[in-house]
């Protein structure tokens, strides 16, 4: 076993020089060489808390997870998370003109059913067994869209059907864009339930080529999202009002599948979702969110399974994820737009979920400029050669923001392709901005894995180290390349085995 002290940039991107103190590079190089010399001398596995050069007051050694009662706060969070209740009234879409068979557009039928349900004081808009074709479905307060087992809701492949543009968030930036396939804006008591299937019908011929990658059907000369993406991000940096950030036809910014925006009391339960244009589940700026028992199986570009963004009090439980990107990714806005809103993602409980393919199992970032706090994940099972990490925090000095209070316990991983726990400040743009991220208080207990490239991959900045990482009772087998630990303060390992060997702490005082 070994420690690797030269960080490898996330996703293979180079670290870009940013507005750092002039001596930082020299100090970092000296430190790296020193660690290499020490590691060579001891001839064994070395873990180094306190790798960061001193910059301001730090937390005391061993303070990671110092709130031993952190998990005792979970009942308080769960007590606030209550699934919305709906009147016992059903509004079958077939009563409003929807025709089974998948050939007749039922968009207007859904609109009429939702309106009637809301006017009556609420209830269920029911999709019965069979196949139904529709454009976007917009929900209103006290409406539960219930897709029964045996029902398949197929969504139109015509982008024009998702206009006019609606208020939404795209990769962490607010704008007016194509409507999500299922959407609610500023509503209360809304739900998507049932045992049926939602088919976005995205593939290498529809939606996915807009990513601009040949793996998803794009070919040279075809339109793609790049120019509009850059224009949107620049608008946010320039402070252009959201009402003037209007995108749609000709811009190629794919919509999310399910997005409830500024809603209160949200339930998403039981449905199976596949072939999504982009992110599958995207509750945004919501309070009291339950995602339970869903199956997310979609392997397109940016096909994250569940991305709660700037939400408070979120429960994700009993779900199955097999995705083309992160399984669960907690977010809070990108760059200037995230800082403008300053709405963190907080009080999140993830439990009893299964993760197969994906870039990460439980992920925070990279759109985390509004911050993240109090995240609890337990009793999950992860296993796939195409799952890269178990716990992942991805950020950089362009994003900024903070992550504090992340707690994981009793998670079992078979194999992951990269690292079991990865915290990396070099994601995407790398160290190219003026907003050093803050990541502190990460507590991981009784997590096991059978195969990975790294056990830990923890990379901070010299002037903004990762602070307070504690692992207790963990067992990591089949680790091929040891660890990357760079600019980390207060790394505390207690009863941790890597490849069957107990890890001994070595502390450097510089």
Image (cartoon, helix red, strand yellow):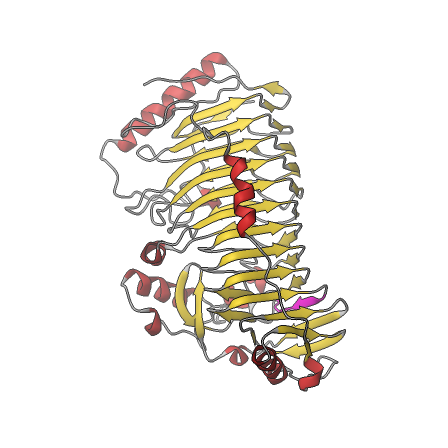
* Image x and y of residue 221, in percent: 48, 71
The C terminus sits in image quarter? top left
Residue at image point 46% right, 16% down:
40
Residue at image point 30% right, 46% down:
435
Magenta highlight: main SS:
loop
* Image x and y of residue 284, in percent: 47, 60
Residue at image point 54% right, 61% down:
265
* Image x and y of residue 9, in percent: 44, 41
Position above or below: 41 against 163 = above
On whether residue 159 falls in the magenta region, the answer is no
Residue 324's image quarter?
bottom right
Task: Specify whether residue 63 is in view.
Answer: yes
Position above or below: 466 against 296 = above
Q: Residue furthest left?
A: 22
Compared across the picture, whether 361 is left or right of 227 comes to right
User: Which residues make up the magenta segment?
Assistant: 196-203
Task: Specify whether residue 305 is in view.
Answer: no
Compared across the picture, whether 506 is left or right of 130 comes to left
- Of residue 292 and residue 56, the one placed in the foreground of this image is 292
On whether residue 202 falls in the magenta region, the answer is yes
Compared across the picture, whether 291 is left or right of 231 comes to right
């Amino acid at each position: 076993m070994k420690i690797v002290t030269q960080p490898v940039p996330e996703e293979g991107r180079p670290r870009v020089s940013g507005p750092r103190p002039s001596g930082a590079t020299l100090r970092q190089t000296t430190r790296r060489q020193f660690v290499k010399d020490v590691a060579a001398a001891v001839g064994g596995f070395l873990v180094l808390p306190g790798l960061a050069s001193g910059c301001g007051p730090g937390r005391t050694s061993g303070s990671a997870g110092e709130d031993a009662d952190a998990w005792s706060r979970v009942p308080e969070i769960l007590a606030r998370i209550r699934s919305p209740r709906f009147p016992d009234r059903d509004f079958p879409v077939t009563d409003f003109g929807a025709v089974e068979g998948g050939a007749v557009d039922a968009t207007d039928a859904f609109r009429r059913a939702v309106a009637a349900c809301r006017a009556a004081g609420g209830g269920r808009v029911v999709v019965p067994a069979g196949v139904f074709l529709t454009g976007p479905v917009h929900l209103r307060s006290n409406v539960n869209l219930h897709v029964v087992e045996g029902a398949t809701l197929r969504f139109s492949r015509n982008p024009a059907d998702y206009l006019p543009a609606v208020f939404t968030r795209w990769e962490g930036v607010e704008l007016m864009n194509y409507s999500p396939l299922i959407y609610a804006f500023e509503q209360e008591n809304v739900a998507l339930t049932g045992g049926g299937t939602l088919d976005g019908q995205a593939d290498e011929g529809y939606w996915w080529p807009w990513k601009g990658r040949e793996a998803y059907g794009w070919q040279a000369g075809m339109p793609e999202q790049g120019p509009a993406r850059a224009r949107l991000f620049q608008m946010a940096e320039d402070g252009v009002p959201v009402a003037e950030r209007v995108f749609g036809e000709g811009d190629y910014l794919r919509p999310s599948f399910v997005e409830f925006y500024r809603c209160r009391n949200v339930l998403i339960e039981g449905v199976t979702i596949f072939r999504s244009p982009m992110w599958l589940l995207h509750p945004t700026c919501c309070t009291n969110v339950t995602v339970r028992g869903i199956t997310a199986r979609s392997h397109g570009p940016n096909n994250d399974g569940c991305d709660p963004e700037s939400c408070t009090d979120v429960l994700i439980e009993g779900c199955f994820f097999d995705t083309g990107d992160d399984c669960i990714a907690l977010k809070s806005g990108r760059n200037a737009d995230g800082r403008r809103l300053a709405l963190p993602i907080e009080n999140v409980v993830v439990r009893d979920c299964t993760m197969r393919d994906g870039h990460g199992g439980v992920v925070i970032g990279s759109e985390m400029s509004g911050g993240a706090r109090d995240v609890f994940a337990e009793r999950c099972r992860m296993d796939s050669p195409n799952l890269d990490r178990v716990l992942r925090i991805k950020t950089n000095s362009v994003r900024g923001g903070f992550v504090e209070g992340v707690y994981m316990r009793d998670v079992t991983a078979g194999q992951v392709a990269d690292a079991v726990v990865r915290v990396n400040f070099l994601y995407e743009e790398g160290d190219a901005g003026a907003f050093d991220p803050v990541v502190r208080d990460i507590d991981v207990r009784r997590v096991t894995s059978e195969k990975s490239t790294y056990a830990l991959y923890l990379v901070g900045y010299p002037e903004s180290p990762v602070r307070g990482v504690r692992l207790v009772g963990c067992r990591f087998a089949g680790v091929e390349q040891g660890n990357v630990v760079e600019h980390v303060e207060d790394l505390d390992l207690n009863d941790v085995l890597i490849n069957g060997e107990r890890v001994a702490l070595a502390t450097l005082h510089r």
